[in-house]
Amino acid sequence: MKQAVAAAALLIATVAGPTYAAAPPAREASLQELPPQTLSAGQCALALWTRESPAKRVFMAFNRPAVARIQTGGRTQELALKSRDGAETYGHSTRETFQGGGAEVTTEIEIEPRGGLLSGAVVSSGTLEYKDPAGWSVVLPVAGLLACQG
């Protein structure tokens, strides 16, 4: 786990701010930092951080069950997997879309297996598009990790 945290810190050193598909009011289209999540034995998760300073963990997707979690309005929201496309690594694909509660999140990522990471991979770059129930959308540059609990 310490390797994963160190790798995440290294990955998010390059900073790029968010870009908006529409200019939302401050209360709209805002993803908040997701609290720590726990993995069950045999479960793999994709964790994505913003590429701003300080970086924030804004997204986690799990392989079993196939759901994602985000934080909006001070509460954690769970979204069901709608579609996936591309190469699969540890139960996650390079493009995935999740929906729930009127919200939709689409991730497009580059997954790179790396030496020294046991049961995991690095997400060197990617984007996360969040569409809120009011119709606002935001596209964020992200980096992250794919990790599995033994």
Image (tube, rainbow, N blue to C red):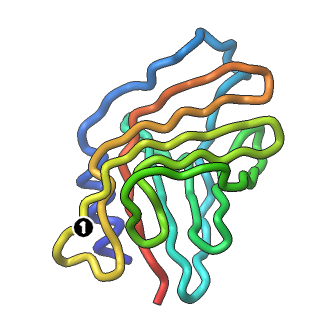
Q: Which residue is more in the foreground, 21 or 57?
A: 21
Looking at the image, which residue is at 65% across and 48% down? Answer: 98
Residue 142 quadrant = top left
- Secondary structure type for disc 1: loop
- In the rendered image, the residue lying farthest to the top is 23
Q: Is residue 46 above or below residue 59?
A: below
Residue at the disc numbered 1: 113
97 vs 119, left or right, is right
Callout 1: few (<14), some (14-19), or many (20+) C-alpha neighbours within 10 Å? some
Residue 15 image position (x, y, % from top left)? 29, 33
Q: How many marks?
A: 1
82 vs 47, left or right, is right
- In the rendered image, the residue lying farthest to the right is 101
Residue 71 image position (x, y, % from top left)? 68, 46
- In the rendered image, the residue lying farthest to the left is 115
Amino acid beneath label 1: Pro
Residue 38 image position (x, y, % from top left)? 61, 74
Looking at the image, which residue is at 55% across and 40% down? Answer: 106
Looking at the image, which residue is at 72% across and 52% down? Answer: 79
87 vs 59, left or right, is left
26 vs 109, left or right, is right
